Image: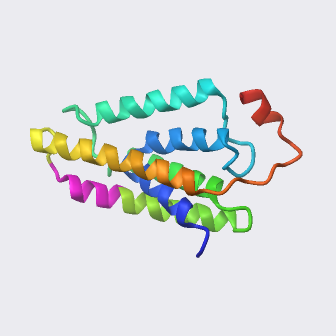
């Protein structure tokens, strides 16, 4: 299982804050740390994804924010975890197992994050726990991306060059 920690870690971030995981993937792609050329890496994409992550963190504290375990939200977290796990699997590892590690991380992050946060996020204490969760998600995303290895360059770098 060596080499899949970053895949699991990004999935865990997706379970906590899915748009933070998307932003982390955009930043990782800009540093050549993702598999393939499927993730746009240009500055506009990075800023848009980072803005969406900040908006998600703000929206998470609102009274109308849905529970992360509702099927559409849970499914999106799993999809981001799977894709991120695939993208961060080191080049000597199986991308399919990386995707599974990402799914496992997303499920764990979703359920453990919700359990730690508690059922009522609309109180002052709930919002404080949400801010702590935000900080953990961002810190873990930075750790995961900085510890992921650079992927070897492929001959088909057209998409990456168009998006930078």
The answer to whether residue 65 is above or below residue 3 is: above
Asked which quadrant contains residue 88, the reply is: bottom right
Residue 91 at what x, y percent from top left? Answer: 73, 62
Judging from the image, the colouring scheme is rainbow
Location of residue 121 (image quadrant): top left
- Highlighted magenta segment, given as a residue range: 110-119
Quadrant the C terminus occupies? top right
Quadrant of the image occupied by residue 40: top right
Quadrant of image for the N terminus: bottom right
Queried whether the magenta region covers residue 65, the answer comes back as no
> From the viewer's perspective, is 151 left or right of 115?
right
Which residue is more in the foreground, 133 or 119?
Answer: 133
Percent of width and height locating residue 162? 77, 28
Q: Nearer the viewer, residue 7 or 151?
A: 151
Task: Compare residues 77 and 72 and report the one nearer the observer.
Answer: 77
What's the residue at 44%, 44% (across, down)? 18
Residue in the image at 18% along x and 40% along y: 127
Secondary structure mostly seen in magenta is: helix
134 versus 150 height, above or below: above
Q: Nearer the viewer, residue 148 or 162?
A: 148
Does 145 sit left or right of 125 as displayed? right
Is 118 magenta? The answer is yes
The residue positioned farthest toward the bottom in the image shown: 1
- Residue 156's spot in the image, x, y percent? 86, 42
Name the residue: 48% across, 31% down: 50
């Amino acid at each position: 299982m060596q080499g899949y920690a970053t895949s699991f870690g990004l999935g865990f971030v997706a379970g906590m804050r899915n748009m933070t995981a998307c932003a982390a993937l955009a930043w990782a792609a800009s540093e050549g740390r993702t598999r393939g050329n499927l993730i746009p890496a240009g500055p506009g994409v990075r800023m848009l994804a980072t803005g969406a992550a900040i908006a998600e963190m703000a929206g998470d504290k609102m009274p109308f924010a849905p529970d992360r375990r509702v099927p559409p939200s849970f499914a999106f977290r799993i999809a981001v975890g799977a894709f991120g796990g695939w993208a961060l699997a080191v080049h000597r590892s199986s991308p399919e197992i990386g995707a599974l590690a990402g799914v496992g991380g997303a499920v764990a992050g979703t359920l453990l994050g919700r359990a730690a946060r508690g059922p009522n996020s609309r109180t002052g204490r709930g919002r404080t726990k949400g801010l702590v969760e935000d900080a953990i998600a961002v810190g873990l995303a930075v750790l995961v991306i900085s510890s992921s290895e650079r992927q070897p360059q492929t001959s088909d770098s057209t998409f990456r060059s168009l998006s930078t």
